[in-house]
Every structure is written in C-alpha cells, then in structure tokens.
Amino acid sequence: MREKLILSLAALGTLLLVWDFNTIFLHLPDEALQGAIYRIIFIHVPAAIGAYVFYSVAVITSAMFLVKKDFKYDSLAVACVEVGATFTLVNLVTGSIWGRIIWGIWWTWDARLTTQLICFLLYLGYLLLRPAVTEPTQRATMSAILAIFAFADIPIVVMAIRLKNVRTQHPQPVLETGGLDPSFWPPLLISFAAVLLIGTALVLVRLHQETSRREIDYLRRELHAL
Amino acid sequence: MTGWSAALAIARKDLQTELRTKESINASASFALVILVLFSFAFDLGREELLEISGGLLWLVYSFAGALIVNRSFARELPNDCLDVLIASPAPGWAIFLGKALSCFLLLMAVELISLPVFGIFYNVQWTGAFFSLLLVIALATWGITVVGAAFSAVTVNVRLRELMLPVLLYPILIPLLSAAMELTTALVNGEGLGGDNSAGVRLLVGFDVIFTSLAIYLVDFILVV
Amino acid sequence: MDIRNFTYLVYGYSAAMLVIFGYVTLLVLRSRRIDRELTRLKSLVEDKS
C-alpha cells in the first residue's frame, strides 16, 4: 500500500515534470535580455518554495515531538529536513549557474543567495548532528530543538540582510509584483506541483527508513536481552 | 529560593569557579589576542580599508572567543554528575539556564573588553570616541551569542565531538546577529552614530536577543533534560 | 537564440536532476543497508529464541 503510494506520487510528479519540460523547452519564447537561460526559473523557484514547505512541516512535527514524545514525529521531521535541504541545494546550484550567465559570476553575497546559503547551513548542521548522537530520545529531542531554532532564525536572517545596503543583484520579486508574463504561470505552477509530489514521495521513503532503523534498534536490544 | 535568586546563585558559582581556575577566560582571551595578531599578518591594508573591515574583524574574534566560553559552560558540569544534580535541584530550569547564560555573558564581556584596547592599538583604530554606543552594541550582541551558545552547549553536552559540533551548529544561527553587530561596529568606529540607518541594526540586535531568549527559556525543560 | 545561454540552461537543469538523483541514490543505498541489517538481526533473533 505504502509502496504503491510512493510509486504513484513519484510517477505523477515525474510525468508532470516531463510535460512541463515539453512546455518550457519547446513552447515558450526566448526572453529578450536573457536568451534561453531564464527558463531555469522553472526549477529554481519551485525548488526554493518546496524546500520552505518541507522546512515548515519539519518545524511543526518537531514541536509535536517535543509535546507528544512520539517518534513518528521525529522521523517525519528528519525526512522533511533532508528533502528540504536537497531542494535548497538544487536552488543554490541552479541559481549559481543562472548567475554565471546573467551576472558573470558564480556567487555573490546578495540578499536572497545569502539567505538561502544560511538556510542550507542551518539544516546541514541538523543533519550532521543526528549521527553524532546514539541514544534515540536524546537525538530526537536535540534535533527538534535545533529545527525550531533554525526555523526561528530564518526571518531574522532575511531582516539582517536587508540591513546591509548591498546593491541587490538578485531580480526583484516578479511573482508578487505580477511582472511575470501570464503564459509563464502554468508551467511554474505545474513545476511547483511536481516538486511537491516528488518531495512527498522522497519523504515517505525516508520515513520508512527511519521506521526500519527503529526496528533495528529494537531488535538489537532484544538480541542483547536474549 | 525564588527563581531569580537561584539564577544569580548559579551565575555566582560559575564565576567563582572560573575566577579561581581562570581556565576558560585565559584560553579565550589568549585565543582572541592570537587571532588578532594573526589577522594583522593576513591583511596588509591601508587605513581606509582597515576602518571598513574593523567591525567584521572584531566580531570574528569575539565569536571565536565566545564559542570557547560557552562550550566550557555546561561541559564543566559533567564530572561527578553535577549537571544531573543541578537539574534535580528545586531551582527552576529557566533559572539554571539564565544563571549559566549570565556567567558566560560576563566572562565573554570581560574577554571582549580586554581585546578591545589591543585591537585599537594593533590596528590603529580609534574606538574611544563612541565608547558608550560601542558598549551597548557589544553588550546586546554578546547576550545574543551567549544565550544561543548556552542553549546549544546544553543541547550538545553529551554529544560526541562536542567541541566540533557546537561551532558548526552555533555560527549559522548567529549570522544575522553578527552581521548586524559588524555593521554597527564599523559604523561607530567610522564616527557615525546609532541613529538613522543604524537604528535598524540596533533594533535587529534587540529583536534577536528577545526572540532567542524567549525561545530558549520556553524550550529550557527540553534543552536541559537532553 | 544565444547558443551559450542554451548550453548553460542544459547545465542548470542537468545539475538540478543530478542533485535529486544523487539524493535518490543515497536513499536507495541506505535502504539496502538497512534491509540487510534488518534481515541479519531478524535471523539472529530467531536463532537465539
């Protein structure tokens, strides 16, 4: 049942992505100033927003773990953080390649890039902390606290970077101001849906791995007892 | 014993222990001075550029020193199960945490105030003019470092490779705080006041302190029992 | 259409796919390791009891 769910989510997500690629690569016109490279927005932005969705789920489940002490919340939290970190990496890498063409440099310390990098570092720390703790309850509690602190830090990072009077090279938000051509919205939304579907499938796989790991711990304890 | 008197008692105990052995204050102050010297070899700058990076330099040194101090804070309670006894005592969790954070704060302030004249001399930077504003910025940012540092010190006290994990987890969270502190320090050293554009930085420092102190106190029961 | 921009577009999407497939590979390898460990432990528990 679970496997069928994962497979169907992944398949649906992949199908949407493939259909999206068809639209993006073959049916959309080139942009006047950027040529073809602007199409990277269709993976760059959904990856970032998808990552934030998963981080939000992670912080909620982390808080639930602290309250309810049920390990399934901890498993869901780590799964969401891992998938979120992967998508943040996708965002950073695609953004870097885009920047190489448009701005001529692989990296710059402007507002959005810095925020994303810090976000990635915060959750990378979370993923690095987990293997360092062997006791499950301790590990889960620590991870939960770290997830909450990390999530609380993100708005402050956004504010802090706005302080620096850095000339932002990053394009102004086009989604909110409606500067995006209406023909771009469908592929963008489909891309976003695909990211969420594939991400959810990955989360479910990771969740199952955590459950198996707990079973391994239980069996090890039983083996010691026998 | 009320919470506040417990917190002060714990802070006094930590400070007395520290002043008798002087282990972390010596290590921290020496480290800060060595790093200051090292940076002077790393950069060969003219006066103008030096004034521009002064804030950054100073806060890098302070954050390295701070990590050493907060690391010792909870680690020193490990031998003889002192930490368990502390937690089992009638003192409320928040009092234990605030007491330790307070002692770290005072120790770090001491190290910073020792390093400040040395910084002024080595780098030929005039900071005496804006001393009280500088003191305010240093105090606000130091409290942010110590409160988050103490929280993570408590969380990682039983983790393998604690000395390595603490900076990896701590610094990304502190980035907005340090960024604002660096900006403000550079501005103050260059003769600007705390008003106008810089007041946003002060607001950020205060906001960071308030948010993370509240978060740490709210989660203290989970942090300490870990 | 500037050829150079298109090349980098392909690089961009390839990089994105690589990261995601890299993570999927990581998951698959981890799954195999976990399954191996699980079967080993289950057989050990059965032998002992």
Image (tube, coloured by chain):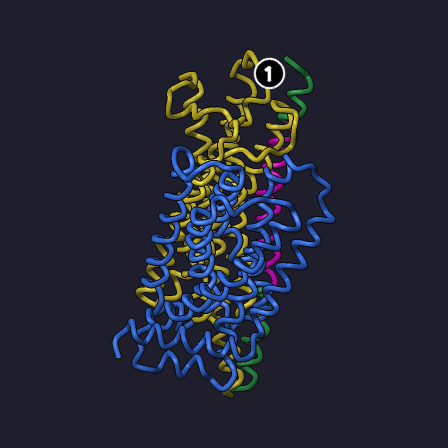
Q: Quadrant of the N terminus of chain B?
A: bottom left
Q: Nearer the viewer, residue A156 or B199?
A: B199
Q: What residue sits 32% from the left and 58% below the top?
A: B214
- What are the residue bounds of the magenta stretch? C10-33
Q: Is residue C26 magenta?
A: yes
Q: Is residue C18 magenta?
A: yes
Q: Nearer the viewer, residue B100 or A126?
A: B100
Colour-to-chain, yellow: A
Q: Position of residue B96 (x, y in %)?
A: 37, 73
Vertical placement of A197 versus B121: above or below? above
Residue B32 visible at all: yes
Q: Nearer the viewer, residue A92 or A112?
A: A112
For chain B, the rendered hue is blue
**In the rendered image, which residue does mark 1 sit on?**
A35
Residue B83 falls in image quadrant? bottom left
Q: What residue sits 65% from the left and 29% below the top?
A: A105
Vertical placement of B177 versus A145: above or below? above
Residue A146 falls in image quadrant? bottom left
Q: Position of residue B202 (x, y in %)?
A: 40, 44
Q: How many marks?
A: 1
Colour-to-chain, green: C
Describe the element under mark 1 as helix, strand or loop: loop
Amino acid on which disc 1 is placed: Gly
